[in-house]
Every structure is written in structure tokens, then in C-alpha cells.
Amino acid sequence: MANSLMRIDPFRDLTRFDPLRDIDELFRDLAGPAWRTEQMPRMRMDVSETEQHYLVKAELPGVQKEDIKVSIHGNQVSLSAEVKNEKSADAAGSGSAGNLRSERYYGQVQRSFTLPQEVDDDQAEARYENGVLSLTLPKKMGAGGKQLAIQ
């Protein structure tokens, strides 16, 4: 008798209708552990704007400062970083110690984006602290559009 009770959720109808909300979870459940592949994590970032600058903060946990590359071409910004696998001397040499579980990602992550206005790459600054890359990208002066006179 207890199994036939239905759980009532009074807020169910207040949620936004999204027919594909659980589709990723469905495919993840259908694919057993043997079919799963290591997925590259997405570089998460915030981009904000002031009158003179674009400010970018990107999360890059576990990355050394020397393994981060930032390139700027006009209004196109590209970030790449490499997370290197840490191999301990004990595990590599003896063969007796091994991983019981490994979920951390090792490899290259990349992200590119386009800003509304060109960046003055000579004045751009980058800082990396506590796993967060902070970019200050000054807007290039005089990079606005030009209106043509029709004759």
C-alpha cells in the first residue's frame, strides 16, 4: 500500500518548461562505464566591460603560470592552458602503488571569443593567482566605425 502513494510537488508547475532538460542525463545513464570517454572540461570565465577596458576572469585550477598562453588579434582573444599529469616517483618506479580512481583531467584546454571592439594589445595585462587568470584588455582608441558620406 505504501508503494502506491504518489509524491506531490506543489512547485512543479512553477518551473520553466524545458523539454530537453534531462536529455544529457538520459544519455549518460544509457552509456555504461565502458562507453564513457574522458570529457575535456570547459574553461569557465566572466567577461565584463568598463568605458576603457574589457575585464576577463578565467578559472584555470591546477595549471602552472608557465603553461598558460594568451593571444590577442584585433578583437579576437584566445586562451589555452595545459594541465600536466603529476607522476610520483614511488608509483612510477615500484609498480606496487597504483591509482584506485582517477577523475582529474590532464591535457589541453582552449577557449576563444570575440569582443565588440579591438583591444590595445600593447597595454594589455595578465595576472594569474589562486587558479584564476585575470586579463585587463584596454579598448583601442579610434577603432570605432566610420560612416561614409553618400555622393
Image (cartoon, helix red, strand yellow):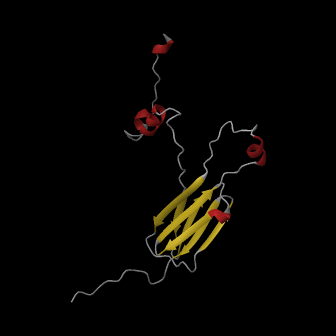
Seen as rendered, the residue at the extreme left is 151
Q: Position of residue 40 (x, y in %)?
A: 54, 50
Instruction: Looking at the picture, tell me which residue is in the foreground, 145 or 124.
Output: 124
Q: How many marks?
A: 0
Q: Which is nearer the eye, 110 or 8?
A: 110
Residue shown at the point (67%, 60%) measured from the top left: 64
Q: Position of residue 143 (x, y in %)?
A: 43, 81
Instruction: State whether residue 35 is above or below residue 50.
Output: above
Which quarter shows the C terminus? bottom left
**In front: 41, or 137?**
41
Q: Position of residue 104 (x, y in %)?
A: 63, 46
Residue pictured at 48% horizontal, 63% vertical: 112
The quadrant where residue 30 appears: top left
Left or right: 131 in relation to 53:
right
Height in image: 6 above or below 114? above
Q: Residue at x 59, y 53 (%)?
A: 107
**In the image, is residue 110 above or below residue 31?**
below
- Taking the spot 47% from the left edge, 16% from the top edge, the residue there is 5
Residue with the most extreme top position: 1
Q: x%, y% of residue 132?
A: 63, 60
Q: Residue furthest bottom?
A: 151
